[in-house]
Image (spheres, rainbow, N blue to C red):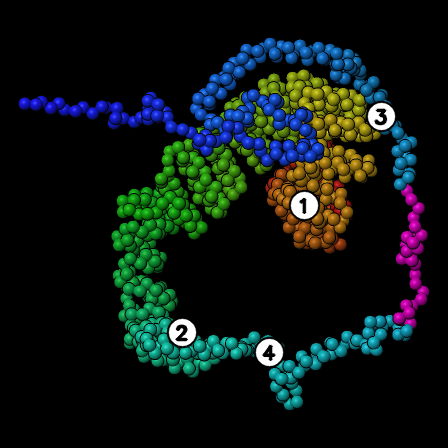
Amino acid sequence: MYQFKQLVVPDFLNKKAPPNYIAGLGRGATGFTTRSDIGPAREGPTEAALEKAKAAAEGKGPSNGGDDDDDERFQDPDNETGLFNAAPYEADDEEADRIYEEVDAKMDERRRARREAREREELEKYRKERPKIQQQFADLKRGLAAVSEDEWASIPDVGDLVRKGKRQKKFADKYVPVPDSVLLGASSQSALTNTLDAKQQLLGGFATPAGAMDGTMTDFSQFGQARDKVLGLKLDQISDSVAGQSIVDPKGYLTDLSSIVVQSDAEISDIKKARSLLRSVTATNPKHAPGWIAAARLEEVAGKQGAAREIIAKGCEECPTSEDVWLESARLNTTDNAKVILAQAIRHVPQSVKIWSKACDLESDPKGKKRVLRRALEFIPNSVKLWKAAVSMEEDPDDARILLSRAVECIPLAIELWLALARLESYENAVKVINKARAKNPTSHEIWLAGAKLVETNGNTKMVDVMLSRAVKALAEKGSTLNRDNWIQEAETAEKEGYVATCQAIIAETIGMGVEDEDRKSTWMEDAESCIAHGSYITARAIYAHALKVFPHKKSIWRRAAFLEKSHGTRDSLEEILQRAVRYCPQAEVLWLMGAKEKWLAGDIPAAKGILEAAFAANPNSEQIWLAAIKLEVETGEYARARILLASAREKANTERVWMKSAVLERQLGQPDAALTLLATGIAKFPTAPKLYMIKGQIESAEKNDPVTARETYTKAIRAIPSSTPLWLLLSRLEESTHQQTKARATLEKARIMNPKNPQLWCEAVRVETRAGNTPMARALLAKALQECPTSGMLWAEAILMEPRAQRKTRSADALKKCENDPVVVVTVARLFWAERKVDKARNWFGRAVKTDPDLGDSWAWWYKFEGEHGEQQHGGANGAGSNGTGAAPNGANGATTGENERQKDVVKACIAAEPAHGEKWQAVAKDLANVGKSSDEILRIVARGLVNTI
């Protein structure tokens, strides 16, 4: 037998061919390739190259033998734009480029140190050969350190003498003779004319030339006569003739004119279309009540009252169960007919509350109203509206109580009826009614609150807390949806109704509902602020009280509660809460100081000193308490004791303010030498304290009259504290007071370089030029200042005042766009209205200014000054002001003055409450030694007396 072997198929036949495999290549079967398969051997010339070659051939450009930028000899070998331009950029090319870049970076890193050293040596060699100008004069600049202050002061002012003659000649060339025509025109404008115009002479007088040329004259009086004649004809048409006299009622005339309805053709056409449309609606669907009502109202609008009544009567026949149709029919008919119509309606719709209410309204007799309502309750005993109307008609409380007893039996879920019944019952019966209502309405919080208010009215305030505690638990068990915010609203409502205990109990039981422990303090403070904003001060006080029970050692809560009592409480309540506060927070300096101040204001000086002694025991090193005790001694005239306290304070609380207050006290007492000694010691201890330098310089320039020493003090100060703006201002003003205008300008310029974007320095520079009479330079500086400080109200106020009167409104509008709420700008705008005699607008803007920043004393002073001229008069006089025209006392006496009007007194009260402490004019007066110890109202009057509205 033959054996057949199974053929084995080679495995490579099922596999993919290797890359770049060409079938038959091994045995020479290669085929052929044409030029179209591989493309040209070299890329052809571009169009630009062809154009250039053509131009060269024609002799218009360089030849092929010349220097050509596109020649392949000058090609960058790294930029393959020749033969290999069309070659594909593959992965191996990218890898090769990356390797070459890494090699270049490595080689560059190896050579960097040597390259940088070589460049440094070359730079040093170049600097030695060609040094800078500042290096050439370095030895001379070092020698300037030995120049003294006197030598510096003796240096003459630098003047620009370069090309002086040429500059004057240049300016002189600009002046040209004035033409004769200009001189003649100016003289003719100011001269008087003694002859008449030719046209006027022709017409013979001052008649209108335009009409005289064509022979016509215009008489304007005829227009008025014609108007009166037409009006008289209209009045005659509507007048009645009685015994030959015309009687016209002007009020009735106007009323009749307003009641006349003139219908145009378009309106009549629209009415006809609507009538046909509604007729088809009522015909196709007669049981549709709104169609009948619309048809009746259309006829009413068209003025056909009878047709409207007929249509609505048909509607009542077709739709007897629609209460709207019956009500519309009653409205369109007279009162008597309406009663009949509603009687028919009740037969068809006896359960309609609207129809019964309308029938009650048609009755004019109270007995008839009661009869209708009681008849209605027989048909609809579960209507709260009818029961309330019936109860309100009863004058006897006993009858009303009987009706309410029946009402709550018929409608046990009506909470309003239960509460009304409880208010009419005695206390014992009211409690029973509330308990029954609570049993019928277990989820009603109103009944629980009514019970708490009832108990509070009876005087049992302890039971109120118990009731509300039970109420919160019971409502939570019954699934009440009342949240914490709703409870706070209920507390505010109870406060407004006068139930203080209920309000406090609600807050105590519900203020912590749904609040996380870590969020309690912040959430409760927000709730208290919200209540204060709503005017609910008792609710806010209750929130603070609960928060203090939970957080008794939080100073911020005690401080908020104290401020609330100070603003909206009594003096006793404030003292009580401050005593509790310092007991829990003895380290809170503010609370001690508030307590001492309240005692001081109340006139109890020993108690204030006692509080401060206790504060010393709790805070022995507190600067604020030391200064408060010293101020109290100074205000009471105990200067020796104040000096002893200051000496102790300098040892125990060695701070900058203590040394400053010590020097200020010595200066007030007329001891400038002692003050300078203290200031020298204080400056040695605190070399960066600007106020010590300021006081020292002021004493040297004012009391000692030694501007040279004061200049040295200020110079030393600005070297130590170059960022202090007041020091630069004082030094500039000192130079200006000694007639050193150039040095004052230089000082301010140097200050602006060291303190850029400072509006106070720019404003002072502008004022220096203004005081020197150099207005163009002041305007130029102001323009630069506004570019650097575009939102400075001080600079914008100067810009407004520097403009001419006609352009100040435009300038003020620009200022308000840049800094709308700046009080200085607002006051300046108010002064503009004041100058224009727009009193109401000025008053509103002054109010806006003090509301924006109540701490700015200048705003209050300007307002007081304004009210002195335009306020309401209290006594006789030209403007209700004092002899000085400001409404102030002759010598700035304390208290209200006889020349103040009511508006000025209001300004003074508001200023005392605000206690302002800033402002250019205000601080200059308040810190004057002659005004030490004066109150806010006294300083207000002094500042106002010195103000002059020069706008």
Under circle 2, the secondary element is helix
Q: Which mark is residue 750?
A: none
Q: For marks 3 and 1, give the CA distance.
A: 39 Å
- Image height of 743 relative to 520, above or below: above
Please name the amino acid that badge 3 sits on.
Asp
Q: For marks 3 and 4, give the CA distance.
A: 87 Å
Indicate yes or no whether the magenta region holds residue 194. yes
Under circle 3, the secondary element is loop
In primary-sequence order, the first of circles 3 and 2 is 3
Residue position for label 1: 814
In primary-sequence order, the first of circles 3 and 4 is 3
Please name the amino acid that badge 1 sits on.
Asp
Residue visible at 78% across and 34% down in the picture: 768
Indicate yes or no whether the magenta region holds residue 83. no
Estimate the x, y position of residue 9 in percent, counting from the top left: 20, 25
Residue position for label 4: 253
Look at discs 4 and 2 and give the one toward the viewer. Answer: 2
Q: In terms of image quadrants, where is residue 145?
A: top right
Look at discs 1 and 4 and give the one toward the viewer. Answer: 1
Q: For marks 1 and 4, give the CA distance.
A: 52 Å
Look at discs 3 and 4 and give the one toward the viewer. Answer: 3
Please name the amino acid that badge 4 sits on.
Tyr
Q: Which mark is residue 157?
A: 3
Does the residue at mark 1 contact the one at mark 4 (Cβ under 8 Å)?
no
In primary-sequence order, the first of circles 1 and 4 is 4
Under circle 4, the secondary element is helix
Does the residue at mark 3 contact the one at mark 4 (Cβ under 8 Å)?
no
Looking at the rendering, the stretch of residues picked out in magenta corresponds to: 175-201
Would residue 410 be seen by someone viewing this image from the given angle? yes
